[in-house]
Image (tube, rainbow, N blue to C red):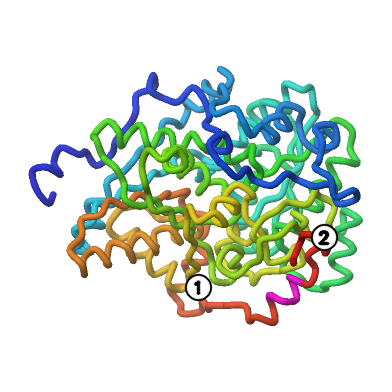
Amino acid sequence: MKDARDQKIPYKIYLSESEMPKTWYNVRADMKNKPAPLLNPGTLKPMTAEELSGVFCEELVQQELDNDSRYIDIPQEIQDFYKMYRPSPLVRAYCLEEKLQTPAKIYYKFEGNNTSGSHKLNSAIAQAYYAKKQGLKGVTTETGAGQWGTALSMACSYLGLDCKVYMVKCSYEQKPFRREVMRTYGASVTPSPSMETEIGRKILAEHPGTTGSLGCAISEAVETATQNEGYRYVLGSVLNQVLLHQSIIGMETKAALDQYGIVPDMIIGCAGGGSNLGGLISPFMGEKLRGEKDYQFIAVEPASCPSMTRGVYAYDFCDTGMVCPLAKMYTLGSGFIPSANHAGGLRYHGMSSILSQLYADGYMEARSVEQTAVFQAAEAFARVEGILPAPESSHAIKVAIDEAMKCKETGEEKTIVFGLTGTGYFDMMAYEKFHNGEMTDYIPMDEDLQAGFEGIPRFPGNME
């Protein structure tokens, strides 16, 4: 411990069961500039609830389109499920602080304390619940690193729903044990792109030997859902509804900090599609939007898939097969196939429309980091904090350490909060490559990105 004042703050701050949030917080209600609506690619008009209901569950469609309700009640059945693993701990990283010899105070919200190993279960149970309530047979989805597929498999097993998962091919091969967890919970898992769908066959014909992408897997999952009666498609990130469900992370974090009068200076999260980052920062962002407090928000993405730091802000397809609606977001182009790095959950070509709008409006910043530096940070964290972090989570760790070291140089006692989204115990192939010196850093050239940008739809007001 550094001093007597710090001794008043426990290593782990837990809310009681009765203090768990009973509502989700919808940050869109406090945004002056609302995220742009999803567009029908055929008409270029905003998607209607009726159109979206052909792909998504009906109540989830209402959540997707609701820009005005600040709080939305969490159904009791979902609250009861959450109690199996929530509230999750907010941890003071005393050991990391001492190792770094920094005056910064570092906290992390740990979301890996469930079998799925990540925050993804927060939205998986909600989406499965609404599918069950609607009387559906099952759901289809995509997964990158596998946490989302695992979480959805668990939720569907609990509720008695069929679950079909299309897993990005490189992750399917790199993370076989996470694949087997999904199968343990009864899901069917298919490497994507596959020969099972028309879109998968088309992508393989155009890109023989491709390692796949989340955009490819989304296309296959949507095709399967729309061609099988009684099924709907569910998504683990990007969508407004998912960020809504994940707001429970930020609400718990804020409640825990408030208990001890702690006000963070900066909040850091890894960013792929935006679910965990959006969930973590939502209530804090709400305060900033309302002019009540100010915080520094940092989104951290892989240098190999830099949608925010090097992408363009435009309407683009959410999937490689171009069957989904158009979303306005920071994007590298739906045809962009990122390198097969080990942060599989961050290999998406675009960013949440909510976070994209907030970034465009200057409410948050973004940084990209290289893979080997991320694993160096992961190893440093694991050696002193006792948790082996997921590669995705380690992007946030990397920047949190960077900021703590800046405090060491300046003597500032900033309070840093970051999201530790999950564990890396199924990512040992990645750690093995890092330890063997076989891990490489890939940063796309401008011409690589330009090829993706060229596939972004051109219409008046877009890409101009």
Q: Which residues are magenta?
A: 449-453
Q: Is residue 182 magenta?
A: no
Left or right for 464, reference 369:
right
Magenta: main secondary structure? helix
Q: Which mark is residue 460?
A: 2
Q: Residue at x 48, y 27 (%)?
A: 84
**Helix, strand or loop at disc 2?**
loop
Identity of the amino acid at label 2?
Answer: Pro
* Mark 2 crowdedness (10 Å alpha carbons): few <14, some 14-19, many ≥20: few
Q: Relative to the observer, which residue lies in front, 149 or 251?
A: 251
Q: Residue at x 82, y 72 (%)?
A: 207
Q: Quadrant of the C terminus?
A: bottom right
Residue at which label 1 appears: 433
Q: Which mark is residue 379?
A: none
Q: Relative to the observer, which residue lies in front, 266 or 148?
A: 266
Give above or below for 238 relative to 305: above
Closer to the N terminus: mark 1 or mark 2?
Answer: 1
**Helix, strand or loop at disc 1?**
helix
Q: Where's residue 461, x and y in %?
A: 77, 59
